[in-house]
Amino acid sequence: MRKVLVVGAVALALVARTGATASYTTAFPLTENPLSEGGVWATGHAAGIDWSDVRTTPGLAFGTQSGLQNYNDSIAVLQGTWGPDQAATATVYTVNQTAGNVYEEAEILLRFQISPHTARGYEINFSMRNDGSQYTQIVRWNGSIGDFTLLDARVLPFVLKTGDRVAASAVGNTITTYVNDAEIFHVTDSAFADGNPGLGFYLQGATGVNADYGVSCYAASDAGGVVPACAPPPQPQDGRMTGGGVLVSSTRQIAIAFELNCHASTGHSNLEVVWNNGRFHLDNLTSATCYLDPTIAGTDGGHRQPTFNTYVGKGTGRLNNSPGASASWTLTDGGEPGNNDTVTIQIRDRNNAVVLDATGRLVDGHNDAHK
């Protein structure tokens, strides 16, 4: 979100790169509105109501903000448990850079939370301007729409181009902004010490869904503020994934069984999910993508290197035998003996209300990727 610009000196420092504890990387392989990737993301309108969603086409994430209303940025936040020292990076895509009264921004979010009518955390934004007024800002969102604090800002000494890398970290009370691995500036703030990484976009002074700027890759970690590298775009693979087991989420146990094709139009796919107060049966697989995630290094005892290990899908079906429900999921095959296989799944009822949202490792079962 654009604020009154504060101009200061530019300091440069290289960013170190090492391993991560919790991490996530994506090159946005799917067409989704809103961004979900199997329930991994919560988005601004779907989860927060007052803000806008992030959407994707293969290889690009971008905003849906109309440009007519200020401060209802398009935002998306990763789900799950993250440590407080976070870092994230994104690869810029920009076609028609702006000047004058038109403002386009890509945003990295840290220690962020979204719930109905509340979005809070740190926004680090990067403007897509080409008239000498391009900037980066660190902003604290305090909760309600339009309630924010501009912590500091700098004019960028260069114009962002497609392929440039923007990044941010939050370590202790220090929040830092980077471009192409060089620190631009940092601030200190102690308002928030928890929340999750995410991304966002801002549009002002133009109308319509704006896909001429966005990011083509995103990565986040909680490895002490170490900025992770973006993965290359995954290549969709043929095959199918089978398996299932028990997913332990909070105080619930969730049983899942499936046989899913890597192409929604190929053959018949099955998915059954049962938990304490519900049962979902897949009737129609509407979207499916299988790809190899290089961060998952599993093999079958060293005998097989799979062509894919990750399955992202969506479908419609019946909830407690009532039609009109939908599900989205991400399944991973971490190799033998199967104790690193994971499931992320979100199920909505016929009114689009979330009735199940769970992620974790499988026990008493496993996922198997097949060519």
Image: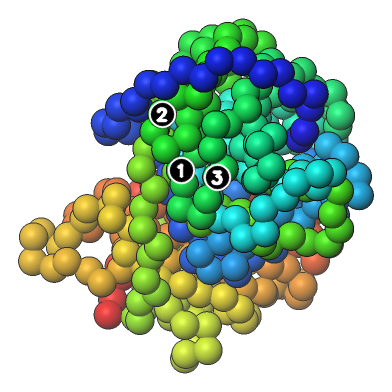
How far apart are the alpha carbons under marks 1 and 2?
10 Å
Q: Position of residue 357 (x, y in %)?
A: 61, 49
Mark 2 Cα-neighbour bin, 10 Å: few <14, some 14–19, many ≥20: some
Going by the image, does 344 lie left or right of 137?
left
* Image-quadrant location for residue 232: bottom left
- Residue at (47% x, 91% y) in the render: 267
Looking at the rendered image, the quarter that the C terminus falls into is: bottom left
Disc 2 marks a residue whose amino acid type is Ala
Query: According to the image, label 3 marks what residue?
Result: 160
Which of the numbered marks, if any, corresponds to residue 182? Answer: 2
Task: Tell me the CA gap for discs 2 and 3.
Answer: 13 Å
Q: Which residue is mark 1?
A: 165
Q: Nearer the viewer, residue 349 or 87?
A: 87
Which label lies toward us, 3 or 1?
A: 3
Check disc 1 and give the amino acid type: Arg
Name the kind of residue labelled 3 in the image: Leu
Please tell me how crowded label 1 is: few (under 14), some (14-19), or many (20+) other residues with Cα within 10 Å.
many
